Image (tube, helix red, strand yellow):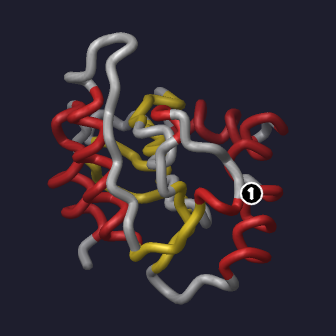
């Protein structure tokens, strides 16, 4: 899988033109450098793609903030997922079955393992569709395994 091509295919609707992946965590969050030299975080469990730093220097400063590092590492959630689902195979990540933005709980019963490519594709598609849901609207998830 060409990760940059996959990110651009699935998330370019946000205006993202990914150039490089700077970091990835066990929940498939990606820290992406874009064509403008800005850094964005794709957060699949929240269906977001947000600018987190405007330059490499700003990114370096961001890594010095304990709150950012704790949020990025997701240590407690990773430990919970590992205990419930086991270790990850190469190319796989943990994720929420029902995304957090749709009320999915950050608990073991709402977690599973998926290939990173599948997570990028599905989270990008869900995020795009979520824009169409009116405030207070409802969505039905079929989470059969």
Which residue is at the front of the view, 72 or 82? 82
* Residue 81: image location, x then y, percent: 70, 68
Residue carrying label 1: 77
* Residue 42: image location, x then y, percent: 43, 44
Q: Residue placed at 69% from the left, 84% from the top?
A: 86
> How many labels, in total?
1
Against 99, residue 24 (above or below) is below
Residue density around tag 1, few if under 14, some if 14–19, many if 20 or more, within 10 Å = some
* Residue 70: image location, x then y, percent: 79, 45
Image quadrant holding the N terminus, namely: bottom left
Q: Residue placed at 55% from the left, 42% from the top?
A: 104
Image quadrant holding the C terminus, namely: bottom left
The quadrant in which residue 114 appears is bottom left
Q: Relative to 25, is 136 on the left or the right?
A: left
Q: Residue placed at 73% from the left, 64% from the top?
A: 78
Q: Residue placed at 59% from the left, 38% from the top?
A: 59
Q: Relative to 19, is 144 on the left or the right?
A: right
Most extreme residue toward the top, as rendered? 135
**Secondary structure beneath label 1:** helix
């Amino acid at each position: 899988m060409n990760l940059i091509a996959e990110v651009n295919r699935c998330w370019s609707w946000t205006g993202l033109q990914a150039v490089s992946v700077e970091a990835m965590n066990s929940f498939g969050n990606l820290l992406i450098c874009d064509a403008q030299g800005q850094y964005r975080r794709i957060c699949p469990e929240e269906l977001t793609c947000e600018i987190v730093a405007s330059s490499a220097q700003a990114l370096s400063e961001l890594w010095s903030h304990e709150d950012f590092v704790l949020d990025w590492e997701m240590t407690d959630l990773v430990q919970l997922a590992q205990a419930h689902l086991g270790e990850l195979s190469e190319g796989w990540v943990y994720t929420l079955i029902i995304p957090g933005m749709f009320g999915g709980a950050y608990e073991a019963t709402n977690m599973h393992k998926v290939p990173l490519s599948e997570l990028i594709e599905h989270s990008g598609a869900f995020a795009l569709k979520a824009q169409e849901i009116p405030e207070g609207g409802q969505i039905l998830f079929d989470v059969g395994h």
